[in-house]
Image (cartoon, grey):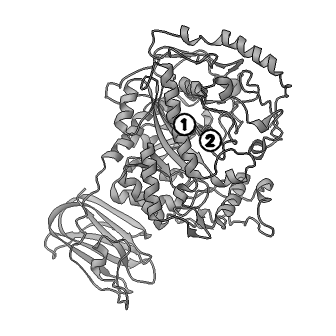
Amino acid sequence: MTRQPLHRRRPLTVLSLLLVVMAMALGPTPSSAAGTDWWDPTARPAPDSQINVTGEPFKGTDSQGEVRGFVDAHNHIMANEAFGGRLICGKPFSEAGVADALKDCPEHYPDGSLAIFDFITNGGDGKHDPDGWPTFKDWPAHDSLTHQQNYYAWVERAWRGGQRVLVNDLVTNGVICSVYPFKDRSCDEMTSIRLQAKLTYDMQDYIDAMYGGPGKGWFRIVTDSAQAREVAQQGKLAVVLGVETSEPFGCKQILDIAQCDKADIDAGLDELYDLGVRSMFLCHKFDNALCGVRFDEGGLGTAINVGQFLSTGTFWQTEKCTGPQHDNPIGGAAAPGAEKELPPGVDVPTYDEDAQCNKRGLTDLGEYAVRGLMKRKMMLEIDHMGVKATGRALDIFESESYPGVISSHSWMDLNWTERVYRLGGFIAQYMHGSEQFGAEAARTKALRDKYDVGYGYGTDMNGVGGWPAPRGADTSNPVRYPFRSTDGGAVLDRQTTGQRTWDINADGAAHYGLVPDWIEDIRLVAGQGVVDDLFRGAESYLDTWGASERHQAGVNLAKGAPASASSSESGIFTSYAPGRAVDGDRGTRWASDWSDDQWLRIDLGSTSTVRRVTLDWERAYAKSYRVEVSTNGTDWQSVWSTTAGDGGLDTARFSGVPTRHVRVHGLDRGTDWGYSLYEVGVHTS
C-alpha cells in the first residue's frame, strides 16, 4: 500500500485558532440551533461533523405492515474500548467534543511510527498523519484498521439514509490485549464488555441531550422486537446489543481442560441479558471450552493460531470434512511478528490441504450454552463457529424448531444457507465492495425468494477487517452526488467532517457515514433488486428475533413413557435399558446388541397427531433406519427414513400422523457397535 506524504504537525496555537474558525464556519451554537424538524437536534455541539442529508426520515410501515429499512447486523461502535483501549484510536462521541473524540492514539504521534497494529495488519511501516479533527488527512480510510469509523454523526447519516436496525456487537480479545504493548484498560473480556455496554447507553444519553432529554433522540437501544418495531415506526434507529468475544464467561480451555462450568455459563448469560444483550457468538477467534472456530486464512490465520497457542496451549487441529461445508484453509503464510512470541522450539504446525475442518466441534458445555440461549430467547451468531460446531448447533435448533440463528457477516459456509432460512433465521453479508456484494447476493437470491426474506449487511466497522476500496471516479457508472435515498425521501450529498469531504468513488467506504453511498454504489453495480432485498432486511431480522421470543418449548410426549427394545446391551455398572432413551437425561442412553435390525419402541399412552421425532445418537449410530408409527402397536407405518445417517442429532419431520406407538427401526449400523440413543423426543409440532 502506498501511503500519502506526511505533513508536519501544526503548533498548538495554530490548531486552537483553527478550531475557533471551524466552530464559526461549521456549527451553530446550542442557543441558535433550534429548528422545526423533529430529526434535527436543537443543541448539536459546535463545532461538529456535518450530516449532509436533507429530507425527513421515513416513518411507519409499508402497505403490508412491514418495517422498511436496512439492517446492519454486525458493527462495533465501542471497539475503541476493546483490546486494552488503544488498538482502535478515537471515540464515537465525547462530552468534550469532536476534537477530543476524533484524535489518534498518543503513541501514533508524531508520524505513526509506533502504530504497531497498523503495519502488522496492513503492511508498510504504519506511518501516517495522526491528526484527525479537523484535517483527517490519512484517516478514517477504507484501509485504515486502527481508527474510529463510528463517530455518532456518521452513524446518524446512515440512519438518515434509510437504516433502521443496527446490531452493536460488544467485542474484545484478551490475548490480543495482553500482547499489545499499549493499553489503559483491563484485558479481562467481561470487564471490557460491561464497559462497552455502559458506554453504548451513555451514547444514547449524549444524543438524547441534543434533542431535549431522555427518549427524544434517534439512537434507541432496544431489548425486544416489539420495542424495535416501535422505534422503526417512529423513523428512528433501533440498536441491538450483541457480544463477540473469544472466551465469554471466562470459558477458555487450557490444554483441552475447560476453565468454566455450567454455573459460570448461567451466571454469564444472565448478566449479559440484564445488560440488554440479545445475540452473541460462543466462540470468535480461538477454540474455547464451548466450541471450535472457523479458521482465518493466510498470515492473519497464522498470527491467530499463535494467539490460540498462547491462550490455550494448543494449536488448531484439523480433520477431513464429512460434508460439503468446510472451514477456511489455514494456509502456511508466515507471520513473523506473531511467531516470535512463541516459546523457543515451538513452531506453528503445517496442515494437510484435504483436511479443512476444525476437529473441535460443539462441546458439552457449548451445547449447554446453546440451550441456555434458547431458554432466554436469545439469538446465536454462528459466524466464526467451525462447521462441525455449526452443524451440531443447527441440529439442536432444528430439534426444538428454534429460529434464533444469525449469520451476520459472511463467516458462515454458504452451504448452510437453506438450513438457516428453513429454521427462520437471518443472514447478512459482510460489507464487501459492490461487485463482490452483488455476486454473493446473486448466489443466494433464489433461496431468499423461496423463503420470502430480506437481506442484511454486516459492516464490521471498527472490526479490523478492511472495507470497500474506491472503484474510481473515472468508472463508467460512478455514484453521482447528490443522490436520493432508497425510499426517495432524503437527498444525500458528499459527507464533510472538519476540512475533509469524502466521496465513495474516490475514497471507498472510509467510515460509517458512507454506508448510504455504498448502498447507492450497489444499486448502480448490482441492480435495484439487491437494494430492494436489503430494504426488507430490517423486517426479516425482526421476524427472526420476534419468533425467537415467542418460541415455546414443545412437549416431549416420549419423556417418561414406557419403552421396549429388540435388545439391550448388558453393563456391569451401567444400565442401557430402553427407558434410558426417554428419561430426559442426556447423560444416559439405550444401547442395542452389536447387530443390525434392532428397534426401540415407545408407547405414548394415548393417540396424538405426531409431526416430529428427534433422535440424539451416541457414537454407535444408525446409517440406515426408519421412524415408524402405529395406533395399535401391531400395524406399522413408515413416516421417515434415511440411508445416509451420520450420527449426531437427527430431526425427522413429516406430515401429522395419528400415533400412539413410535418405533425407531435400525437397519444398517454406522459402526461395528450396535445402535445407541441418548434421547428420543416425540412432538406434535
Q: Position of residue 1 (x, y in %)?
A: 80, 37
Residue extending farthest bottom: 572
Do callouts 1 and 2 mark residues in contact (Cβ within 8 Å)? yes
Q: Nearer the viewer, residue 394 or 225?
A: 225
Local crowd size for mark 1, using a 10 Å CA cut-off: few (<14), some (14–19), many (≥20): some
Kindly tell me whether residue 367 is visible in this rendering: no
User: What amino acid is labelled 2 in the image?
Assistant: Glu
Quadrant of residue 102 within the rendered picture: top right
Q: In this view, does 172 lie above or below 100?
A: below
Quadrant of the frame with the C terminus: bottom left
Quadrant of residue 648 within the rendered picture: bottom left
Local crowd size for mark 2, using a 10 Å CA cut-off: few (<14), some (14–19), many (≥20): many
Query: Residue 199, which numbered label?
Result: 1
Q: Position of residue 136 (x, y in %)?
A: 73, 25
Q: Is residue 676 left or right of residue 258?
A: left
Q: Residue at x 39, y 58 (%)?
A: 371
Label tally: 2
Label 2 SS: helix
Kindly tell me whether residue 486 is visible in this rendering: yes
Q: Position of residue 300 (x, y in %)?
A: 71, 52
**Separation of marks 1 and 2 at Cα, in angstroms:** 9 Å
Sequence-wise, the earlier of marks 1 and 2 is 2
Q: In this view, does 109 lie above or below 600?
A: above
Quadrant of residue 669 within the rendered picture: bottom left
Query: Residue 81, which numbered label?
Result: 2
Q: Which of 203 and 324 is in front in this view?
A: 203
Label 1 SS: helix
Q: Which residue is drawn at 62% across and 51% down?
A: 173
Q: Is residue 457 left or right of residue 339?
A: left
User: What amino acid is labelled 1 in the image?
Assistant: Leu
Q: Position of residue 186 (x, y in %)?
A: 64, 49
Q: Which of 450 and 421 is in front in this view?
A: 421
